[in-house]
């Protein structure tokens, strides 16, 4: 993400990208930013809530993918403008949310900075190769 002067931002991450999300949130300011952190279970969700800013919405994905998707829709709908979006999540989640953002919520691709930080069952070198091939 390179644009830091927009009216609103939506930052979505998981445990692998929480530091990047927090840095972006600090840079653009909490007042115009919605932050969603996806965690794998209730234990990690509780730890994130305890150690990260209170304005971070923390999702426990062990309850199903609906919670993250609903949080995404609610966040976009609560913003007055089309937000700049940063996503740092697992590859399949990245693909699903990117499709929802562009097709359902009409966020222009130019407003989205999305990178699959990791892919379940794939090591870092394999993910890098998949990204180069456009398959991640």
Image (tube, rainbow, N blue to C red):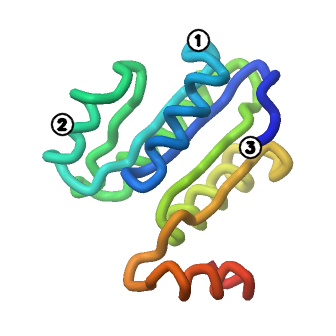
Direction from residue 115 to residue 73 in the image, left or right: left
Packing grade of label 1 (10 A; few <14, some 14-19, many >=20) is few
Residue identified by numbered label 1 = 31
Disc 2 target residue = 46
Residue at horizontal 73 percent and vertical 83 percent from the top = 132
Q: Earlier in the sequence, mark 2 or mark 3?
A: 3
Q: Secondary structure at mark 2?
A: helix
Q: Position of residue 9 (x, y in %)?
A: 66, 29
Q: Can you tell which of label 3 and label 1 is closer to the viewer?
A: 3
* Real-space Cα separation, disc 3 to disc 1, in angstroms: 18 Å
Relative vertical location of residue 69 with respect to residue 99 in this rendering, above or below? above
Q: Residue 71 location, x and y as percent?
A: 45, 38
Task: Please give left or right for residue 31 compared with residue 57 in the image.
Answer: right
Residue at the (40%, 77%) spot, across then down: 120
Vertical relation: 48 (above or below) 97: above
Q: Which quarter of the picture shows residue 76?
A: top right
């Amino acid at each position: 993400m390179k644009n830091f002067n927009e009216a609103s931002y939506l930052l979505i991450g998981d445990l692998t990208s929480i530091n990047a999300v927090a840095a972006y949130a600090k840079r653009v300011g909490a007042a115009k930013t919605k932050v969603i952190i996806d965690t794998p279970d209730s234990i990690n969700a509780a730890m994130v809530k305890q150690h990260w800013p209170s304005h971070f919405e923390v999702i426990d994905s062990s309850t199903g993918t609906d919670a993250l998707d609903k949080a995404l829709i609610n966040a976009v709908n609560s913003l007055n403008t089309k937000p700049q979006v940063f996503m740092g999540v697992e590859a399949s989640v990245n693909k699903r949310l990117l499709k929802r953002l562009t097709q359902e919520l009409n966020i222009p691709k130019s407003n989205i900075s999305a990178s699959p930080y990791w892919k379940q069952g794939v090591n870092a070198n394999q993910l890098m190769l998949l990204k180069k091939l456009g398959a991640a």
